[in-house]
Every structure is written in structure tokens, then in C-alpha cells.
């Protein structure tokens, strides 16, 4: 089957905290993909000696292996076990109770001859292209539904010039408000050290015949539509069909470069790590 993967760091001087991979078992009757977007820690650290890139590689590898080897387990169960294994790997060296202990957004898709299962946690995006060519976005939108006062703080940050003391102070205030809602009731959830968070994910199942392609995008790649408005999700899938995952990221990079001050298109980072997985399920496999 056709699988196209691309990922690129937002800053060449920093590790890429996104992680993307696909497994196609030797049976040839199914497969799975996993896409993670690591959460960049604050300057004062996250209580971990390893770093976010280490965490996403550990979590992603465990989750992919479980998704293909344990078809008796639901994807949420696979995620819970992968989180448990990853936490166990560094609990003796790191402070996993730290509010910013390494964590990531998650997209998992698993398919066989009959079904396509999915799981989405936090703000990466999954696109399911139907047999009619229309794309349906599956998203965990809790970050977009934060309390009005928190969203107002974000808007205040973005209204201030970059590099000014006023923006730095507003950004610090906004960050504290967001941290209070991280992995908390009424807030939003990411995969960190608590396996129970897997139960908060958005999950679903579709018939294999109803799904033509799947595309998973971290928010750095989803900027193509969500931030820069270069097209809708149908257009995004069309671009992946015709030009591929790397070209989509290239177009995002061009849009970022054209707005270095983030004035035309307000965003938290000028450039962000970006990753895309595109899989055509109409072909054998």
C-alpha cells in the first residue's frame, strides 16, 4: 500500500519532538500508524533528564508495537499500556509528578480487512477521506474550549509585539492559566505519565470500504489549513494525493517565512515541528 511520511523540526538547532511511524505486519491484511507531537517544556525544565524527543520515541514505539501485536486490545488500552511502560522506563530517574513531565498529543489509526479504528488525544488532527473523496476531520477540541478568560489571555499575548516586556509578562500569565487546566477536569488532556488519560481520548471505528485514505497531522503541519488558511481539509487531502507530505510541510514553511513577526497569522511559535502521515487504504494491505 502507499504510505507517505514526512517530518521536520521547526528549529534546526533543537531536536524534533514530533514522532511518526507506520507498521505493516507480514500478514498483509492490516496495519497501524502512530503520530505524536511532543509538548515543548518551559525554560525551567520538566523534571525529566531525558527530554521530550526521548519520551515521544519511547511512547510512540511502544504504542505502535501494541497496536499491531495486540488486536485484542482497544486502542485506548494500547495507549494506556504504552504510557505505563514509558513511565516505568524513567520513573527511577525523573520527577513524573511534575506538571510538565514529558507529554505528547496522540493520533493512532489501526486497520484490517473490515475496519478502520482511530484514537485522537489533544490537538493533532486526523483526516478520514471517504469513498466520495470528502475529508472528515477527527479532532479533540478541548484546547479550543478552554474558559473564556483563558482564551482572552491568549488573545492578549498575541496582540502585543514580540520581544517586549509586556508580551513576556502576558505570556507568563497565560502559561500559568493553561498549566492549571493541563490534564485536569474542565481542561485538556495529553499523554504523559498517567495511563488513565487514555480514557479521555476521542475514539471511533469505520468500515474499511468507507475509508479511502487517512492523514495524520501534528498542529505544526495542520497550520496549512488552521492558521494560514491555504485550503480546507478536502484541499489538504488533495495536496497529499498529488504532491505528498513533504510538499505540504514545505508550503507551511513558506507561509511561516512570509510572516516572521506573526502579525498576519498570529501563532504561538514562528515555526513549529511538523509531521504528516498519509496512507492510502484502497490499495492492498
Image (cartoon, helix red, strand yellow):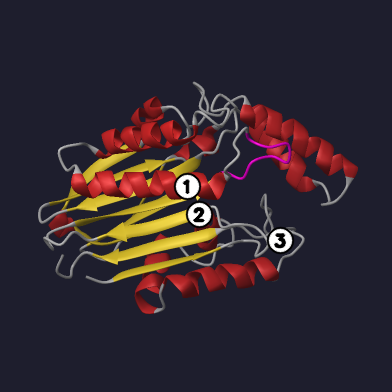
Residue at coordinates 63% horizontally, 35% vertically from top-left? 46
In terms of secondary structure, where does tag 2 sit?
strand
Q: Earlier in the sequence, mark 2 or mark 3?
A: 2
User: What range is drawn magenta here?
Assistant: 39-46
Between marks 1 and 3 in the image, the one whose residue lies nearer the viewer: 1
Q: Which residue is mark 3?
A: 264
In terms of secondary structure, where does tag 3 sit?
loop
Q: Residues within 10 Å of mark 1 (few under 14, many from 20)?
A: many
Q: Is residue 223 inside the magenta stretch?
A: no
- Label 2 and label 3: CA atoms lie apart by 26 Å
Q: Is residue 124 visible?
A: no
In the displayed structure image, the side of residue 186 where residue 195 appears, left or right: left
Q: Earlier in the sequence, mark 1 or mark 3?
A: 1
Residue at coordinates 25% horizontally, 46% vertically from top-left? 67
Q: Earlier in the sequence, mark 2 or mark 1?
A: 2
Residue at coordinates 65% horizontally, 60% vertically from top-left? 271
Report the disc number at residue 56.
1
Camera-nearest residue between 234 and 188:
188
- The part of the image, by quadrant, that contains residue 157 is top right
- Residue 183's place in the image compared with 130, above or below, is above
In the displayed structure image, the side of residue 92 where residue 155 appears, left or right: right
In the displayed structure image, the side of residue 85 where residue 261 appears, left or right: right
The reply to whether the C-beta atoms of the residues labelled 2 and 1 are less than 8 Å apart is yes
Name the outermost residue toward the front: 92
Q: Residues within 10 Å of mark 2 (few under 14, many from 20)?
A: many
The reply to whether the C-beta atoms of the residues labelled 1 and 3 are less than 8 Å apart is no
Query: x, y percentage for residue 226?
Result: 53, 55
In the displayed structure image, the side of residue 41 where residue 245 appears, left or right: left
Q: Is residue 245 visible?
A: yes
In terms of secondary structure, where does tag 1 sit?
helix
Query: x, y percentage for residue 194?
Result: 43, 27
Camera-nearest residue between 197 and 267:
197
Amino acid at each position: 500500500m502507499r504510505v507517505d511520511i514526512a517530518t521536520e523540526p521547526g528549529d534546526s538547532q533543537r531536536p524534533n519532538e514530533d514522532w511518526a511511524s507506520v507498521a505493516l505486519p507480514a500478514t498483509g491484511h492490516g496495519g497501524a500508524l502512530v503520530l505524536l507531537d511532543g509538548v515543548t517544556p518551559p525554560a525551567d525544565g520538566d523534571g525529566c533528564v531525558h527530554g521530550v524527543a526521548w519520551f515521544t520515541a519511547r511512547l510512540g514505539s511502544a504504542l505502535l508495537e501494541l497496536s499491531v501485536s495486540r488486536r485484542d486490545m482497544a486502542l485506548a488500552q494500547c495507549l494506556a499500556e504504552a504510557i505505563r511502560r514509558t513511565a516505568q522506563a524513567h520513573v527511577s530517574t525523573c520527577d513524573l509528578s511534575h506538571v510538565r513531565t514529558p507529554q505528547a498529543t496522540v493520533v493512532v489509526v489501526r486497520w484490517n480487512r473490515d475496519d478502520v479504528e482511530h484514537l485522537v488525544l489533544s490537538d493533532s488532527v486526523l483526516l478520514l477521506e471517504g469513498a466520495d473523496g470528502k475529508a472528515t476531520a477527527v479532532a479533540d477540541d478541548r484546547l479550543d474550549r478552554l474558559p473564556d478568560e483563558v482564551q482572552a489571555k491568549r488573545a492578549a499575548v498575541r496582540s502585543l509585539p514580540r520581544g517586549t516586556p509586556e508580551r513576556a509578562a502576558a505570556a507568563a500569565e497565560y502559561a500559568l492559566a493553561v498549566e492549571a487546566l493541563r490534564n485536569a477536569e474542565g481542561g485538556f488532556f495529553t499523554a504523559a505519565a498517567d495511563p488513565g488519560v487514555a480514557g479521555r481520548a476521542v475514539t471511533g471505528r469505520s468500515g474499511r470500504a468507507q475509508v479511502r485514505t487517512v492523514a495524520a497531522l501534528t498542529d505544526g503541519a495542520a497550520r496549512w489549513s488552521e492558521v494560514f488558511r491555504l485550503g480546507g481539509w478536502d484541499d489538504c487531502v488533495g495536496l497529499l494525493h498529488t504532491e505528498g507530505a513533504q510538499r505540504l510541510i514545505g508550503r507551511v514553511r513558506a507561509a511561516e517565512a512570509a510572516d516572521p513577526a506573526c502579525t498576519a497569522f498570529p501563532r504561538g511559535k514562528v515555526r513549529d515541528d511538523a509531521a504528516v502521515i498519509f496512507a492510502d487504504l484502497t490499495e492492498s494491505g
